[in-house]
Amino acid sequence: MNDAVIVDVVRTASGKGKPGGALSGVHPAELLATVLRALLDRNDIDPATIDDVITGCVSQSGEQALNIGRTALLAAGIPDSVPATTVDRQCGSSQQAAHFAAQGVLAGAYDIAVACGVESMSRVPMFSSTQGKDPHAPLAARYPQGLVGQGIGAELIAARWKLGRPELDAFSARSHRRAAVTAAAGGFDDEIVPVGGHAVDETVRPSTTLEGLAGLDPSFTDPAIAARFPEIDWSITPGNSSPLTDGASAALIMSEQRAVALGLRPRARFHSFAVTGSDPLLVLTGVVPATHRLLARSGLSIDAIDTYEVNEAFAPVPLIWQREFDADPHRLNPRGGAIALGHPLGASGTRLLTTLVNHLEATGGRYGLQTMCEGGGMANATLIERL
């Protein structure tokens, strides 16, 4: 079988996802167009040869409506003969886009595809697409106790896995420290595409301390929730959660045969894939069954994998993952994670992939694992092998 390989991966630097953030003045389609142009220019690819552009985006309303992948493709100057589609698997949308692109190559349906993602949380806020309606109303009969938001899900995970506030904050401080060290050493330089001169992750706070984090108030306190779930200690704060973020990212994926024919160097190959559902009440635990499924399919043990990227939507998520697999903490999010680098929803999957490929190359690692919890109780997991 012809391998599906990653030829290149790029991303914007993170921008704070609020008015006045570094990327808040940029239309989200232009954010994505910027990384698409860079991806093609860096590899001297004839854009007309792309078979499909698969885009992750969560809040598909306003400026992100009507298939933003197609809008961005045209804004980037790519020929109108190239199609695009936009997918929504919540936070894992662009990771799923990478799965679809690679699986299309493996199936022989594509020779060259782009997987990408974008989210402008400053211009298209979370939940704006619901227009004040309850999309979960039809689930009332199945879940009479009612579902909860992801913040409460994180609180429930922290309580049930007995993760205290000091442990959550220590992990968060580590995320900022690792991201700041990597940035200072130039570790992100090759993966970041400047947008309007912005080329530094705005969400990283090098001065973060445990003392500062300890002074933050919980974000999701609610008397009704407290009465329903008395085990909650209210430990989730802005400091141990991922920030609202603007950003875009993209990966150039093709068959190994086509890459060789074009004189391009494959940087990694897709080894194994998994996607799974999980408890929609806890919402964020899917990374555990998804990783179990991925390891079973790959035939590898967790110790055989050199680097793990587990999205830091909230600090409890990577911590329960680490505990479940007895994973080496030094291999977990070694360049920091979303708590520091930001979580631009639909762009996060290919952002993690970008950082994962670059870290494997910098350290000489062979295998990298990526997994992402997702709204509605789901998760994707991906295993790549550096070439």
Image (cartoon, rainbow, N blue to C red):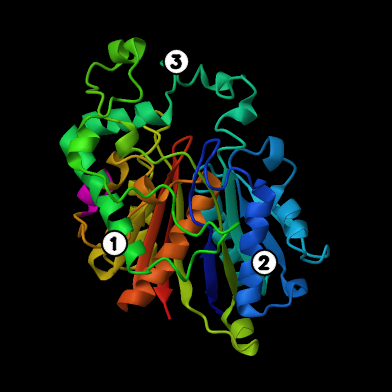
Mark earlier in primary sequence (2, 1): 2
Circles 3 and 1, Cβ within 8 Å, touching? The answer is: no
> In the image, residue 294 lies at what x, y percent?
38, 59
Distance CA(mark 2)–CA(mark 1): 29 Å
Residue plotted at (59% across, 88% down): 260
Residue 270 in the figure: left or right of residue 251: left
Work out whether 227 lies above or below 52. above
Residue plotted at (67% across, 46% down): 27
Mark earlier in primary sequence (3, 1): 3
Instruction: Kindly identify which residue carries mark 2.
Output: 37
Can you see residue 163?
no
Dividing the picture into quadrants, the one containing residue 296 is bottom left
Circles 2 and 1, Cβ within 8 Å, touching? The answer is: no
Q: Name the amino acid type tagged 2.
A: Arg
Instruction: Kindly identify which residue carries mark 1.
Output: 181
SS at mark 1 in the image: helix
Can you see residue 95?
yes
Q: Name the amino acid type tagged 3.
A: Pro
Q: Name the amino acid type tagged 1.
A: Val
> In the image, residue 43 lies at what x, y percent?
62, 78
> Is residue 321 within the magenta segment?
yes
Instruction: Kindly identify which residue carries mark 3.
Output: 144
Span shown in magenta: 320-325
Screen quadrant of the N terminus:
bottom right
Distance CA(mark 3)–CA(mark 2): 48 Å
Q: Residues within 10 Å of mark 3 (few under 14, many from 20)?
A: few
> In the image, residue 121 lies at what x, y percent?
55, 39
Work out whether 111 lies above or below 26. below
